[in-house]
Amino acid sequence: MAGKTEDVLYDEEAAMDAAQEQSAVLQLRDALIREHDDALKGRPRNEALEKWGADIEAEILRNIQGSGD
């Protein structure tokens, strides 16, 4: 019986980890899409996002891959 509880707990932890990874990637993607939409609407550019967006995305991906080890 105790083994089954541990399996359920492990599955919940795995699901939580997967959700955090997915949300981290989606938030960045949403920010980039929002920036593109703002540019189409004629709003001023977000120069910081243009300069650091690729670095931020790479860091997030490294963190996700590193936490999976």
Image (spheres, rainbow, N blue to C red):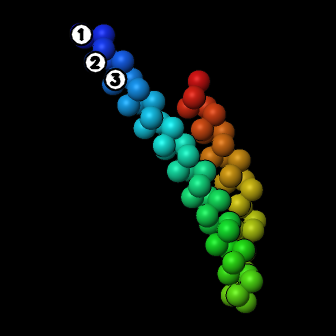
Q: Quadrant of residue 38?
A: bottom right
User: x, y (%) of residue 53?
Assistant: 71, 61
Q: Are marks 1 and 2 in contact (CB under 8 Å)?
A: yes
Q: Quadrant of residue 15?
A: top left
Q: Quadrant of the N terminus?
A: top left
Residue 5: give its label.
2
Amino acid type, residue under disc 2 in the picture: Thr
User: x, y (%) of residue 42?
Assistant: 73, 89
* Residue at the (52%, 50%) spot, across then down: 23
Q: How many marks?
A: 3
Q: Secondary structure beneath disc 2?
A: helix
User: x, y (%) of residue 63?
Assistant: 60, 39
Amino acid type, residue under disc 3 in the picture: Val
Cα distance, mark 1 to mark 2? 7 Å
**Considering only vertical position in the picture, is 22 above or below 47?**
above
The 10 Å Cα crowd at callout 1, few under 14, some 14 to 19, many 20 or more, is few
Cα distance, mark 3 to mark 1? 11 Å
* Residue at the (75%, 68%) spot, across then down: 50
* Residue at the (59%, 24%) spot, across then down: 69
Q: Are marks 3 and 2 in contact (CB under 8 Å)?
A: yes
* Residue at the (25%, 11%) spot, across then down: 2
**Considering only vertical position in the picture, is 9 above or below 41?**
above
Residue 1: give its label.
1
- Seen from the viewer's position, the closer of residues 51 and 22 is 22
Amino acid type, residue under disc 1 in the picture: Met
Residue 8: give its label.
3
The 10 Å Cα crowd at callout 3, few under 14, some 14 to 19, many 20 or more, is few
Precedes in sequence: disc 3 or disc 1: 1
